Image (spheres, rainbow, N blue to C red):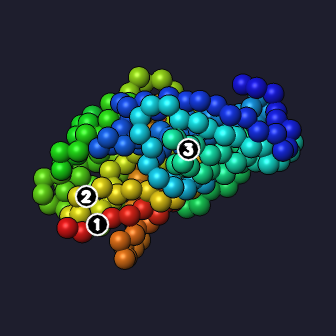
């Protein structure tokens, strides 16, 4: 990683958006976030802490430009503004607070824990194609295995709970990094599937709080919604590592359409 940037400095990068991460032909939002945020990190602030992304318009696979502006460089936290553009148009705007996470035990946690789920071997892996036939390319990169109790919509029996749970890891089985958590927080099937709404759910805004370095092994992920209204819904996500520590939280506002 590069040395810490001075406030007010900026840099421009050309990136290649990988077509194999596409959902229905459009790049996965968590993948785009990971690629953009990585460019805002440095040796003194190597990990994302709080990330907020607005998806202005969807890019296509191929070359894109990422502009990074350092807003502030502090002893513990560096703040940056990141813009991903393509064909002269802004596609994603991101605010990034970066610092350093450790694998230390939490000082305090609430009286709750990770979601209860069957063993990973009893949870089927999600295929790279949705129930509606849409190609979901990122499931070739993310090994996601749903708790059968929260995947009955796949058999035409939605439960109406608006919650999905499952196990997750990188497909190459390498240990997950804090940057990977940005992907996993946006990698569950939409909770609308559990309500019988199977269409595309594009993200408008996504905020991720990374809470620590994930331990090696499978992650447990749960995603829920509280309300659908006027074509918009919220999704709340928690990611827990193999030592039962929560390592990421996320919330997003996304669109939906009832046919």
Report which residue position mark 3 lands on: 88
Precedes in sequence: disc 1 or disc 3: 3
For the residue pair 173 and 117, the one nearer the viewer reads as 173
Residue at figure coordinates x 44%, y 66% from the top left: 234
| Real-space Cα separation, disc 1 to disc 3, in angstroms | 29 Å
- Residue 11 found in image quarter: top right
| Real-space Cα separation, disc 2 to disc 1, in angstroms | 7 Å
Left or right, 215 with respect to 47, comes to left
| Real-space Cα separation, disc 2 to disc 3, in angstroms | 29 Å
Q: Tag 2: Cα neighbours inside 10 Å, few (<14), some, or many (≥20)?
A: some
Precedes in sequence: disc 2 or disc 1: 2
x, y percent for residue 88: 56, 44
Instruction: Work out whether residue 214 can be spotted.
Output: no
x, y percent for residue 163: 34, 60
x, y percent for residue 139: 33, 36
Precedes in sequence: disc 2 or disc 3: 3
Report which residue position mark 2 lands on: 199
Cβ atoms at labels 1 and 3 below 8 Å apart: no
Report which residue position mark 1 lands on: 257
Query: Compared with residue 67, is residue 153 higher up or lower down, i.e. above or below?
Result: below
Residue at figure coordinates x 55%, y 61% from the top left: 111
- Outermost residue toward the left in this view: 156
- Residue 233 found in image quarter: bottom left
Cβ atoms at labels 2 and 1 below 8 Å apart: yes
- Residue 65 found in image quarter: top right
Position of the C terminus by quadrant: bottom left
SS at mark 3? loop
Q: What label sits on residue 37 in the rendered view?
A: none
- Outermost residue toward the bottom in this view: 230
């Amino acid at each position: 990683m590069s040395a810490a940037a001075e406030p007010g400095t900026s840099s421009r990068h050309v990136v290649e958006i990988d077509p194999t991460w596409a959902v229905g032909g459009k790049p996965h939002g968590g993948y785009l976030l990971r690629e953009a945020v990585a460019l805002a990190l440095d040796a003194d602030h190597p990990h994302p802490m709080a990330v907020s992304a607005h998806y202005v318009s969807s890019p296509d696979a191929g070359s894109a430009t990422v502009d990074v502006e350092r807003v502030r460089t502090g002893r513990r936290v560096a703040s940056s503004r990141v813009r991903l553009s393509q064909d002269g148009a802004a596609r994603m705007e991101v605010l990034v607070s970066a610092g350093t996470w450790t694998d230390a035990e939490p000082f305090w946690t609430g009286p709750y824990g990770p979601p209860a789920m069957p063993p990973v071997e009893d949870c089927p892996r999600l295929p790279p194609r949705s129930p509606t036939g849409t190609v979901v390319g990122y499931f070739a990169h993310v090994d996601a295995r749903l708790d059968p109790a929260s995947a009955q919509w796949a058999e035409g029996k939605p439960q109406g709970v608006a919650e999905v749970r499952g196990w997750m890891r990188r497909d190459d089985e390498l240990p997950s990094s804090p940057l990977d958590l940005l992907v996993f927080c946006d990698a569950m099937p939409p909770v609308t599937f559990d309500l019988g709404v199977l269409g595309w759910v594009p993200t408008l805004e996504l905020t991720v709080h990374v809470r620590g370095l994930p331990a090696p092994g499978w992650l447990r992920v749960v995603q829920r919604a509280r309300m659908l209204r006027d074509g918009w819904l919220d999704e709340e996500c928690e990611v827990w590592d193999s030592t039962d520590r929560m390592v990421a939280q996320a919330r997003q506002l996304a669109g939906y359409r009832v046919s």
